């Protein structure tokens, strides 16, 4: 326990050095237990209008998870589950949002909405649901990691990094919290912060192939190609059937002049995924060019999509 506390303190000091202007993620409204009275959205009265001394009434943002209705006695979550079985995902999500309006932040309903929203590509809804689950369990890092991942998928990279850092504060021994933070920073173009976070993942879990791939991507984008080769080679060993990892390794090898090995990496990638366009482009180009010096590196296509 003493060792873990020291580790957490070291991580906290590293964050201070990495990003001084961190601001905590705004918390959702406090959860309301099942059966309690729903919270009515208040209005805010602003300062008097300049032209005639009138007050301006501004509605607060509506709850994106709750859908107003006048059917208080209906089991909307039960309806939602039935609709999923029938293949009606849109209808199921509507019913689940009605359930939230009736019951407040019921955890079972929030879990249902989060999972269904992810499947439907509604990442903002999923992130909101995971955030509220995280508020119900203030000591659990996992819901915040899930929220950060949903934000990454929705390309809200800056907020994803901040939420992930909240998760790290809850559990500095969770490698997925550092991984989520790294994905946020990588998506936001903050390469040194991304490298720091992915390195922390690997310190905690040396065989984390996805983190090694993402660290390699960060090194490629920072033009630290020798380092990229090292970590991407390890990633390819751990994820031998993942086409984009071999493509990324090929780019790194090509950049450091190891052309024959790059050809083999591209061949492996296209064999694993014949329709993978980036690897095909790279393989075709390296087959045409006579020497590495003739390459235009700007045309290379490493897979920069964050994966985890």
Image: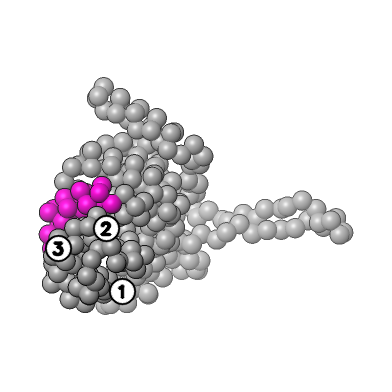
Task: Report the disc number at residue 260.
Answer: 3
Q: Nearer the viewer, residue 190 or 266?
A: 266
* Foreground: disc 1 or disc 3: 3
Residue 161 spot, x, y in % from top left = 41, 48
- N-terminal label among 2 and 3: 2
Task: Report the disc number at residue 83.
Answer: 1
Q: Is residue 138 visible?
A: yes
Farthest residue, direction right:
52
* Foreground: disc 2 or disc 1: 2
The image quarter in which residue 115 lies: bottom left
Q: Main secondary structure of the magenta part?
A: helix
Secondary structure beneath dot 2 equals helix
Q: Is residue 54 left or right of residue 258?
A: right
In the rendered image, the quadrant that contains the C terminus is bottom left
Q: Are dots 2 and 3 in contact, CB under 8 Å?
A: no
Q: Nearer the viewer, residue 122 or 305?
A: 305
Residue drawn 48% across and 66% down? 67
Secondary structure beneath dot 3 equals helix
Identify residue for label 2: 255
Q: Is residue 33 visible?
A: no
Residue 157 spot, x, y in % from top left = 43, 55
Disc 1/disc 3 C-alpha distance (Å): 54 Å
Residue 132 spot, x, y in % from top left = 41, 50
- N-terminal label among 2 and 1: 1
The span shown in magenta is 225-241
- Tell me if mark 3 has few (under 14), some (14-19) or many (20+) residues whose alpha carbon lies within 10 angstroms of its own: few
* Vertical comparison of 90 with 103: above or below: below
Q: Is residue 284 left or right of residue 114?
A: left
């Amino acid at each position: 326990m003493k060792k873990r506390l020291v580790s957490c303190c070291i991580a906290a000091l590293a964050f201070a050095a990495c990003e001084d202007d961190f601001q905590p993620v705004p918390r959702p409204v406090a959860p309301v237990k099942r059966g309690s009275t729903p919270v009515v959205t208040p209005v805010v009265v602003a300062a008097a209008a300049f032209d005639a001394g009138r007050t301006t009434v501004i509605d607060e943002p509506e709850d994106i998870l709750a859908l107003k209705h006048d059917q208080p006695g209906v089991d909307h979550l039960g309806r939602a589950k039935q609709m999923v079985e029938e293949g009606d995902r849109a209808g199921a999500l509507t019913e689940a949002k009605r359930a939230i309006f009736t019951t407040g932040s019921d955890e079972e309903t929030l879990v249902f909405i989060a999972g269904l929203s992810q499947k439907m590509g509604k990442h903002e809804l999923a992130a909101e649901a995971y955030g509220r689950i995280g508020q119900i369990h203030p000591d659990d890092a996992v819901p915040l990691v899930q929220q950060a991942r949903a934000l990454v998928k929705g390309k809200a990279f800056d907020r994803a990094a901040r939420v992930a850092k909240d998760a790290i504060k809850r559990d500095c021994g969770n490698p997925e919290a550092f991984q989520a933070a790294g994905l946020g920073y990588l998506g936001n173009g903050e390469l040194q912060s991304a490298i720091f976070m992915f390195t922390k993942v690997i310190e905690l879990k040396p065989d984390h192939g996805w983190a090694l791939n993402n660290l390699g991507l960060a090194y490629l984008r920072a033009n630290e190609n020798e380092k990229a080769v090292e970590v991407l080679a390890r990633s390819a060993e751990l994820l031998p059937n993942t086409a984009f990892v071999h493509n990324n390794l090929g780019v790194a090898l090509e950049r450091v002049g190891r052309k024959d090995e790059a050809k083999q990496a591209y061949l492996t990638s296209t064999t694993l995924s014949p329709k993978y366009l980036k690897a095909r482009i790279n393989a075709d180009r390296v087959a045409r060019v006579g020497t590495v010096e003739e390459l235009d590196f700007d045309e290379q296509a490493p897979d920069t999509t964050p994966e985890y």
